[in-house]
């Protein structure tokens, strides 16, 4: 099994906590990605400053996308593979700032993400979720 997927599934059940990144105690979507990175790759590649729930929205700044392009390998958005990092735009015209990790592909595809009000869950990658994907990335070679 893919190490990224195995690590991400290990976070399922972690409560949603804004800005947190501790398996079993609390995580948001970025925290999940950071925690999986630490488990699979090693130390985080860049420090993460404190951020508000509406960060980068007033400026329309695609900050998360830019950082992902620096530390992950960008892939074609429709070339799915287990372990891919998915970047979602939750509303038309809003900045892309929700992340998930693709767990399974094909019919019944799923992804693991930290979702406000739900915690870390594995969700079906239904058409409404799929339409929101704006970028797809792969982790660099495992450390």
Image (tube, rainbow, N blue to C red):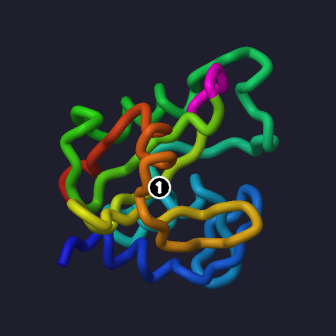
Viewer-proximal residue, 63 or 60?
Answer: 60
Residue tagged 1: 100
Residue 95 belongs to magenta span: yes
Q: How far across and down, in percent of the image, does residue 2 sit? A: 21, 71
Residue 75 visible at all? yes
Q: Nearer the viewer, residue 42 or 67?
A: 67
Residue at the spot x=79%, y=43% of the render? 53
Residue that protrudes farthest toward the top in the picture: 59
Q: Main secondary structure of the magenta part?
A: loop
Question: Mark 1 Cα within 10 Å, few/some/many (few <14, many 20+)?
Answer: many
Q: Residue at x 33, y 40 (%)?
A: 136
Instruction: Locate the C terminus and report the quarter of the image it occupies.
Output: bottom left
State the SS at label 1. strand
Say left or right for 94 vs 88: right
Residue 129 spot, x, y in % from top left: 49, 48
Q: Residue at x 69, y 42 (%)?
A: 49
- Residues rendered magenta in the picture: 92-96
Q: Is residue 80 above or below residue 97?
A: below
Is residue 143 among what the camera can see? no
Asked whether 28 or 47 is in front, the reply is 28
36 and 76: which one is in front?
76
Q: Quadrant of residue 59?
A: top right
Q: Quadrant of residue 10?
A: bottom left
- Is 88 colored magenta in this rendering? no
Residue 115 vs residue 11: left or right? right
Residue 29 x %, y %: 59, 56
The residue at the point 47 percent across, 26 percent down is 66
């Amino acid at each position: 099994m893919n190490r990224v997927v195995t690590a991400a599934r290990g976070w399922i059940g972690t409560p949603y906590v804004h800005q947190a990144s501790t398996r079993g105690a609390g995580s948001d979507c970025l925290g999940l990605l950071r925690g999986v990175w630490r488990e699979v790759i090693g130390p985080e590649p860049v420090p993460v400053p404190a951020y508000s729930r509406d960060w980068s929205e007033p400026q329309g700044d695609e900050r998360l996308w830019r950082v992902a392009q620096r530390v992950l390998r960008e892939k074609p958005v429709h070339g799915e593979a287990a372990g891919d990092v998915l970047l979602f735009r939750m509303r038309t015209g809003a900045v892309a700032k929700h992340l998930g990790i693709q767990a399974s592909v094909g019919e019944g595809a799923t992804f693991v993400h930290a979702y406000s009000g739900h915690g870390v869950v594995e969700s079906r990658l239904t058409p409404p979720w799929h339409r929101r994907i704006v970028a797809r990335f792969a982790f660099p070679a495992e450390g």
